[in-house]
Amino acid sequence: MRNPELYMNRLYSKDWAKRGRPDVMVWDVIPIAKEQLVKVTRISQNSEDLQNVGLSVNPGNGGVEVWGEFVKEGVAVTWDRGTPDEIIFKCTNDKGFLRIEGFHAQPHTKRFLALRPRFTRWYGKGMTVEERDGLRIYHCHNHGFDGDFDNLVFSVELLPPKE
């Protein structure tokens, strides 16, 4: 079983910190309800590479549902021309944490929805986050240590429970 601590703590990039950017993360972790609707919206994309957003919950009892597909632990959604800009996920878990990661897809990725994805660890990959008007806005960088963190910009909003 994977280390559950990985799903409970934000991971900062040591490589970016060495270059004077201690704010750059590999992934973020936010607290969520045991059953949580999460809206992810693509704000902008400035890359020829396909861009992914990965959502995962702690190992154990839980998973992520999107477009009628339930996957234990996590999913990655690939944004290309045919993918909607706004996607609603249903996350269930027993610990109350959601891990969020932005990354670019392997060239062979063809599906909008990658079930049981292998999240990419490119050298220099990272993202920053800002909070604005109840949203968490992520600015992603694909690889290398030059760039403006504009390869993919997306927001995450925790939706109120349905009554």
Image: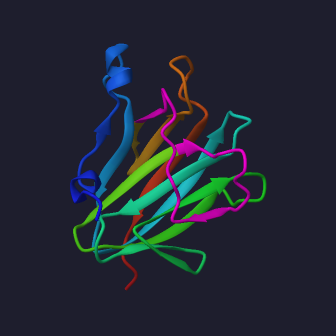
Asked whether 115 or 57 is in front, the reply is: 115
Colour logic: rainbow
Q: Which residues are magenta?
A: 103-128
Q: Is residue 154 left or right of residue 106?
A: left
The image quadrant where one finds the C terminus is bottom left
The image shows residue 87 at horizontal and vertical percentages of 58, 64
The image shows residue 130 at horizontal and vertical percentages of 39, 37
Q: Is residue 73 left or right of residue 95?
A: right
- Main SS, magenta residues: loop
Vertical placement of residue 154 versus 95, above or below:
above
Q: How many marks?
A: 0
Asked whether 99 or 117 is in front, the reply is: 117
Q: Is residue 39 magenta?
A: no
The image shows residue 9 at horizontal and vertical percentages of 24, 48
Name of the residue lying farthest toward the front? 1
Q: Is residue 9 left or right of residue 125?
A: left
The image shows residue 104 at horizontal and vertical percentages of 60, 42
Q: Is residue 127 magenta?
A: yes
Q: Is residue 35 left or right of residue 154?
A: left
Q: Residue at x 50, y 36 (%)?
A: 139
Q: Residue at x 28, y 65 (%)?
A: 1
Q: Residue at x 58, y 50 (%)?
A: 52
Asked whether 102 or 35 is in front, the reply is: 102
* Snapshot quadrant of residue 99: bottom left
Name of the residue lying farthest toward the right? 81
Q: Residue at x 30, y 54 (%)?
A: 30
Asked whether 134 or 61 is in front, the reply is: 61
